[in-house]
Amino acid sequence: MEGVHSLLSRPNSAPFAFSLPAATHRRPKPPPPPVACRAASRWADRLFADFHLLPTAAAADPPAAASPSSSPFVPIFPDTADRALPLPVDFYKILGAEPHFLGDGIRRAFEARIAKPPQYGYSTEALVGRRQMLQLAHDTLTNQSSRTEYDRSLSEDRDATLTMDVAWDKVPGVLCVLQEAGEAQLVLATGEQLLQDRPPKRFKQDVVLAMALAYVDLSRDAMAASPPDVIHCCEVLERALKLLQEDGASNLAPDLLSQIDETLEEITPRCVLELLALPIDEKHNNKRQEGLQGARNILWSVGRGGIATVGGGFSREAFMNEAFLRMTSAEQMDFFSKTPNSIPPEWFEIYSVALANIAQAIASKRPQFIMMADDLFEQLQKFNIGSQYPYENEMDLALERALCSLLVGDISNCRMWLGIDNESWPYRDPKIIEFVVNNSSIDEENDLLPGLCKLLESWLVSEVFPRSRDTRGMQFRLGDYYDDPKVLSYLERMEGGGASHLAAAAAIAKLGAQATAVLGPAADEEPLEIPRMDAKLAEDIVRKWQSIKSKALGPEHSAVVLQEVLDGNMLKVWTDRATEIARHGWFWEYTLSDVTIDSVTVSVDGRRATVEATIEEVGQLTDVADPKNNDSYDTKYTTRYEMAYSKSGGWRITEGAVLKS
């Protein structure tokens, strides 16, 4: 942990941050140094033309003056003796000084820099270049004449004044100085350009080291933000690690490599959780996939037989729970199904995935997932009996299995698991029985069915839906599930009582408000005159949707009109899409050529319908700012729309999917 804290904090003792302690003595003014930097401005040309940097025996001593002919250096690159790289260098900034500093302040800033050379493995040439760049800045700013000229040039043409042609063999030293001065982006941009030239090994390692330290600076900035940007911090540290490992500089700075690696291990779990928490849309899909892969890497490397905890202070169970809360039910199921057989799942993991199966079954109207959940609960019951691992919150799972039975219309099995008809049943819970009875209107037809449905409603709302991102807070009616054609078709095919399961589903749907689970607005209390859904009405709604789509995504970007024809997930998806298109400055123009309604399937209560239609459409994309992005299409496709009727809004499209094009 000590390495982590030193890497991401900025105390004076931090390995990458320079403090400015007062000098204990005044160093006599050194003679003007020879330099390898030729300023682009006229004043600098007069001051620094024809100077070249020479090596010194000790980096802590001022370099001795020498003529160009006395330089023992051979250019690093073949045929690059006259090669130079223009770089912006602010003399004040590289010394850690301010323009209002007097000469003594400039000297103290210079001495502080010299007294604290880089801690990591720069070459002697880079350290000499660093020292001489600092010396040049010191001598310029402590000489009244040259400082006056420098300040005047800054005020007249700052960019030209700061730009210096740096001799090629001195570039690593100047990059070192710039990184220490906080010019991380400049160092990275320059370094990437230099590495493309395939420089010699020692030159390359100096550049890589400066770039890695610049990435570390960016990671600190990310963690210092409010709130901390953990994702960006991880990204830049990963780049630093990759640079050091792949470009041969790891042996020069093993301590730096170790600190980066330790820091990543500590913050990666938080980064993964933030990636998973990103919006579920096309824009963030790649990042969320990174998060899902990161969760796999973490959870599949810990557990029984492996390390006991995840980084960042998480236990395996705590991290998995946090990760699952940021996943959809389908993502949780996929995660579980792809877990290697060599990693046995733990109790809490199986239980969470069983609930995810139930959430997905309700959301997608696919009761086969209920059966998969029930199988998992059965495994857990056997696990409880034979496991050598005790759990504080072991449950008999009778409630879960009872409600799974109810969700597939098996009322008798539901009653059996709850012990309603058997007072000696070992799993019987008197409080649950009391709840069911109190919420039932006992009669010959329904018996305790209303109370069972109320129990199911309460359990779904409190235990199941909140655990998955796609079902948390969703609007849902229990009757909609039992009256869905896909659910009814599945129940009809079930072995051992398909007819009774269908009858139970019909009874639950018929209960209406008495046995309806509502998340969001309350169920309508009065009977409604619902316009009958047929091919004509379906075509009108589809045409209305195409017209409103043109307004929402067109030049006016009127996204608010989407709610006139869309609802639920369809409204959210297209509102996000319209917002994104407007943000880019684009717009779409649609021309509807033809609409053919292929089929209409209506639910028993007449409130929902599935419509399949074939649409011929022309679309034209316009990017006002950059016409090269303009695009168009002319296509014919078949699509399926899920529609629902509400008292306040009439018929609206709630889901849509293209079947073929």
Image (cartoon, grey):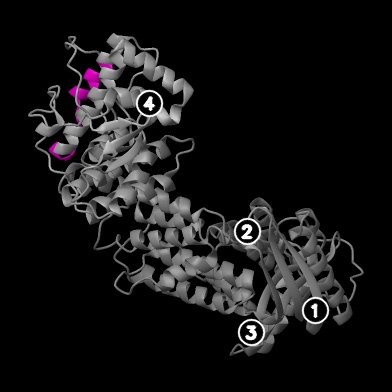
Circle nearer the viewer, 3 or 4:
4
Residue 438 at x, y percent in the picture: 70, 60
Q: Which residue position is annotated with label 4?
A: 42
Disc on res. 490: 3
Residue flagged by tag 1: what amino acid is it? Val
Residue flagged by tag 3: what amino acid is it? Tyr
Q: Quadrant of the N terminus?
A: top left
| Label located before the other in sequence (3 or 4) | 4
Q: Nearer the viewer, residue 61 or 214?
A: 61
Instruction: Give the Cα separation between the discs numbered 3 and 2.
Output: 24 Å
Circle nearer the viewer, 4 or 1:
4
Q: Quadrant of the C terminus?
A: bottom right
Residue contact at pointers 3 and 2, CB within 8 angstroms: no
Residue flagged by tag 4: what amino acid is it? Arg
| Label located before the other in sequence (2 or 1) | 2
Instruction: Give the Cα separation between the discs numbered 4 and 2.
Output: 75 Å
Relative side of 117 to 624, left or right: left
Q: Which residue position is annotated with label 2?
A: 461
Q: Was residue 114 drawn as part of the magenta stretch in this picture?
A: yes
For image coordinates 32% across by 75% down, the residue present is: 341
Circle nearer the viewer, 4 or 2:
4
Query: Within 10 angstroms of label 4, few (less than 14), some, or many (20 or more) residues?
Result: few
Disc 3 element:
helix
Residue 269 at x, y percent in the picture: 38, 51
For image coordinates 43% across by 22% down, the residue present is: 154
Task: Tell me where the magenta segment starts and ends, as one range.
Answer: 108-124
Disc 4 element:
helix
| Label located before the other in sequence (4 or 2) | 4
**From the viewer's perspective, is residue 66 above or below residue 480?**
above
Q: Which residue position is annotated with label 1?
A: 604
| Label located before the other in sequence (4 or 1) | 4
